[in-house]
Amino acid sequence: MADRDHRGGETPLDAVVRDRGIDAPDPSDETGSPGGGTTASDTSGPRPRVARVPEDHDHDTFSVEGIDTDRREGLLEAVLRDVDGVSAASATRRNGTVGVHHDASLSREALREVFAECGLVVAPGDEAFEARRASQFASARVAVAVLFGLMVATPYVAVLYPTRVEWLFYDPVTVQYLQSILDSQMTTHFFINLGALSGVAFLVACGPAIRRATAAVRAGRFTGETAFVGSVVALYGYSTLTAFTGLEGAVHYDLVAYAVVVATLWTQFGVTDTAVDPATGGESAADAADTDADEPVAMTDGGR
């Protein structure tokens, strides 16, 4: 149910509500004011919650992780509205934000202390911004890798693969026609497009890996990313020489694209945290391993 907390047991937020004597919000009650009361005009039926906010009050927005039930939304709002100087508070778990209208005399540090009392950790705004931006770039790299990978794979499936395994699916007439296309001057433009697509996909989608591999080489270290980047660069160089010189062999821009897609998806959904670049992160893996799994959930401060 939406009003139940799946975590079980009493959380620090529940303890704060109990200690302050705050009435737990009723999920079925859609009306109310920051003080929790209703007026005669409010009893006519469900209406959106309305709060009177003084014009001189400041507004801060926090990006939140961990407020994942309607009940926890209501409890956090009730705790914030109980703070002296707060005129309104709104928590939205759907997009993970908490907005607070407060008097200018109430500092952001004081709000952080309230969150800490509720068992919620608030990170500095610049760290939250960097984390969100890194996450957005990671999603963009996945899109580039998948889309460009499909754009490279389609010509291979339609033209090149049939000429390499003609005995499997295609009749001799079709294979001869496709081979004539590859023997014509169109091949140059064909491979230029494939080389550009696979190259851009590699540079954009694997940009962080390339930077980390380069830094490792300069430091005299050999890592898995160094081997991956070196292999892809070697394969791309070989395919380019084969496509535009007299070097005999097959052009493998498709393998470059496939490697980029697999590496990007593995980084995004596998073992690597894409919101933090290991090449620039300030914490070591050992520090992260020492973190207690039962620590309070993290909240990131979105700034004003």
Image (cartoon, rainbow, N blue to C red):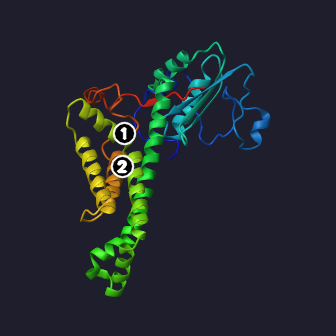
Looking at the picture, which amino acid does disc 2 mark? Thr
Closest to the observer: 184 or 202? Answer: 184
Q: For mark 1, does the 10 Å Cα neighbourhood hold few (<14), some (14 to 19), or many (20 or more) residues?
A: some
- x and y percentages locating residue 191 in the rendered image: 39, 63
Q: Is 52 above or below relative to 249?
A: above
* Residue picked out by circle 2: 264
- x and y percentages locating residue 280 in the rendered image: 36, 29
User: From the image, which quarter does the C terminus lie in?
Assistant: top right
Which element type, helix, strand or loop, lies under badge 1? Answer: helix
- x and y percentages locating residue 7 in the rendered image: 40, 38
Disc with the residue nearer the chain's start (2 vs 1): 1
Pick out the residue farthest to the front. Answer: 246
Q: Residue at x 52, y 42 (%)?
A: 3
* Residue picked out by circle 1: 208
Whether residue 23 is visible, yes or no, is no
Pick out the residue farthest to the top. Answer: 105
Q: Residue at x 56, y 35 (%)?
A: 97
Q: Residue at x 28, y 45 (%)?
A: 229
Q: Quadrant of residue 30?
A: top right
- x and y percentages locating residue 158 in the rendered image: 39, 73
